[in-house]
Image (tube, coloured by chain):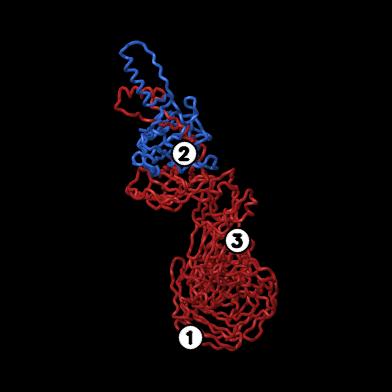
Amino acid sequence: MGSQEHQRDEVRRPSRRAAGFAVFVAIILLPQIAFAAINIGNHMEAEINGFTTGAQFFAYDQGDEAAYDLEADFDLGAYVDTEVDLAGTQLQLATASTAGWWHVDWGARRCFDVVNGGDALDEHQVRLDFDSSADMLAGLLQPLGEDYRAIADDDTTELDFFVEEGVGTANTIIWVQLDLAAFATTSFCLYFDNPTALSESSEAETFTYEDGQREVYFPAWRRFDGSAGNDGTLDVVSYVDDNDVTVGGLTVNLDAGDLFVFTGVTPDTQILTDGPIGGRGRGQGMDALVPATFAGTDMVFPTNRSNNAWTLVSPTDATATVEIYDGTILRWAGSVGATAVTPVADIGGGRSGIIRSTNGVPVIVTHTATNNSFSDAQVVPPWFGDDLFGVRSRNLLIGFENAGSVDVWMDDGTVTTVVGTAGSSQSLNNGSDLDGNGTAVRITNMTGTSGGIQQADRDGYESTAFLPERLLDSEYWLPSQADYIAIACPTAMTINVGATPVPCTPLGPGFPGHAIVGGTPQGTRLASDNGEPFFAYYEDTRTQDETNLLGAKSAWAPALVNLTVTGTPTELLPAGPSVGTWTSPVIDTAATGSNVFGLLTADATLPVGTDVRMQVARGATPALALAATFVGPDGTPGTWFDEGANPIPYAWDFGDAFYVVRVELSTATPGTSPTVDLVSLGYDLPEVAMSSLHVVDTEGPVDDRDWVLRVWTQDPTVAATARLFYESSTGLTGASSASMDLDGVVQIVASGTTITQTSGPPVAVGPGLPHSVVVDTRDMTGVDLVANWEAQLTGTGILVVHELRISFI
Amino acid sequence: MESTPQRSTRRFGALPFTRRSAAIVVALLMIAAPAGASVIVQNYMEAEVSAVAPCFAKTVGADPDPVGTPGALITYDGTGNTTTVDGVDLIEERITLTGMVGDRVIYTDVVNYVNNCTDPITVQLTSTGVSGDWSDFSAEIWISNVANPANIDPNQDPALTDDWNDTLLFVGDPFVAGSTGSVVVAPGASVQGAFVVSTDVAIAGGTTATVNWVAEATLS
């Protein structure tokens, strides 16, 4: 700018070369004008180069996206102390379920070991009896154990189970169906502590066999001889659906409540089923079909009839050596195998029949009397030590294997202690208790092996056995028509007999309740409303024989197996890790020179004390990306992207093609995890022209925040500050509201039809800095908003201006 | 810095006169005219041209970088270019600036028009021609009314402010010659020149366009 430049400027008169002369003329003609104007012309030139890109705008809602939001997607990546929830839609911190805990939603468990000292047992029912009172007091159990689940030792397989009774008491009875290897220990766990879980307890499933039919019922009756009334006809009712029942080679498929009549059944007839059935023979000397559960080695049956015959059969291939005592007098001894035998062993007055298997091989026993044309027959239950339940109908007989005593609690509130000598039978008769109207009875505090029966009902002959509590059930199906049904309930309940509710209410704790039901059709279902078990017998209309109703626990035969069950104390869900990560597979952005990124997003839910954050590794090849160091927004390992939506730094747009996203989940409260519904990385965004950008205001009257534009200022590679400046709008209504910000700094605010803020403070932009336009809108549909994006280059007065037109549709 | 020409030696382009010689010529004409005869009077004159610095100067503004600055958006070359007028090469300041695709770029402080004279000057910018491809460019050349005008606000017409002259020099396609308004610059003062370039989003890469103008200072 030195003076020499101006020495070469053009200095000229106004009319150029003629000017001198003109001035000369002017002086002559206009002498009053002393001097003319002097003009100095300076030549200038500006060359504009139009090949530079200033700001470029890219639509966030366009381009490509690598998204992970389902289990199959997350499985493409790598978990470290993280997992996908059971629904398969959320990433969360791992819990103990990945380290031996079945499911995080169950907060407690109690595990059991079952030692099988015999042959392999497939789909075998294991009865658990444990104390869950502390669990209930600790609030870990639902009232009826609805949250119990039985899980195999693979921590995955759910086992069939049946919560029978006593949840929250010292005697919680739960059945679990297990495959037990021979001479091995099988472990499983009961999980609980889930306040919202629904019950999956199923007696039917637990006592049904998926792997094929079983021989678990035995027609252990006096061998029919073709005489009148001894015709071998068997009425069967199924307890479950799709039950293949085979009797003597004839197979029928029955659903629950279906009835079928088999004929020609002898004590040797093989009966196979997929699941529980009830059965009753029509002939004299026939009674209820006996399940294997009734097999035993020591039984007391306090009966004294005109002629006492005992039908015995071994439910296994083993041969039992059996002795039958008349009190203490041995009346019969012999071998009992798979072919039933029916020895006569009379029992004297005041004595009980004592049946012992001296070699420990269990047998199934029914008693048949000659009274009333052999119509009086009864199953003989095994001895478990449980309280016995029954209904006195005229006579109540209590037998003692050894000298001892029992307490007899009746539903009328009386409690009687009965003392007996070895092999004796003691009676508590009441001649007015007829047709099931007698008192319900609970025999308890037994000092030794005992038995109880009801006998000599109105018809004068028939008997039923008092059953040990563990053989009671909450559901029975009536295999034949009943004249009446007598019920003893250990606890209060309503029993639905078909569609008829029948209340059964004990006087108080320890006393049984009593109920009586009149004539009832064959195939009727009896079930307690609360799942609690009860005792029932009925008078078979055809034979007038009182008959025990036997439940679904047909194949559970503890006497037939050698199992030892031990349990562990309650364990609480172990605290999970406090930090875990999930790493995406390699994302190929297919970048060729440059790649305009969208958002790095983690849609997360953050309970108090939890956090989710992300880093990215990148490389020119997949292998290099996998080996690269994870970094945050500033390109160092020390920074992280937050959960939510994050713009990628500009500098990365010109980097490598292959990316790996790492999501870190953390918690300050182990056991409480953040969850991530979606991890996504947008890339290859298309540039949008300034008048073509549309934002869908999908939320209408609901606040809707949208990432709209990624602003690219890589060229020029200089620092700047930028702001938005409102220019114009159309379509605003009184309901409209919007704010537009740059990187969280509010620039333009519209409220109703008024623009309350036309611009905002400038924010730094430039290479390496993410720079985005975000709008918060409500009811902006149909609005066009025009604004200038203005970047002031740092240290200069140069201003780059770009017009944005956003149409909300 | 620059010497100021003395009024007594003021020179008028290619035909230099002194006051005295002009008076002699007039006197001779007044004498000869009544005679009506064709008289040839020869007057011997002389014009002495001295190359000194003019008092109307231009200095680079704050926005341009020196020529050759890497990545510069705008450069100002005050000495390296000439234009030929009447067979004489004159200095032509050359500004090279960047238009950004799809954007408008405002270069507010490009050049200062400085009055180093002892009397006020009136400055006006007049376009003299264009070259290159202006189909995707347009330019506004502004001159300020004051020495340190406010930056041109893209959201306000500069003509509506007191800082900038109401009439800009617009260059576009097709080219129409024009001029800014005139601005009086006091002795020792300066005004500022600004340049606003708009670049079409569809411009082809490498397109360039050139505009030439003259900054005319009239000394009264």
Per the image, the residue denoted by label 3 is: A80
Per the image, the residue denoted by label 2 is: B102
Name which residue type carries label 3.
Answer: Val
Quarter where residue B149 is shown:
top left
Q: CA distance from mark 3 to mark 2?
A: 48 Å
**What percent of the width, then of the height, locates residue B13?**
42, 26
Name which residue type carries label 1.
Answer: Val
Residue at 59%, 45% (x, y): give it.
Answer: A590
Give the red chain's letter.
Answer: A
Q: Chain B rendered in what hue?
A: blue
**What percent of the width, then of the height, locates residue B92?**
48, 33
Name which residue type carries label 2.
Answer: Gly
To the question of a shared chain for discs 3 and 2, the answer is: no
Q: Which quadrant of the rendered structure holds the C terminus of chain A? A: top left
Name of the residue lying farthest toward the left: A32
Mark 2 secondary-structure assignment: loop
Name of the residue lying farthest toward the top: B37
Q: Residues within 10 Å of mark 1 (few under 14, many from 20)?
A: some
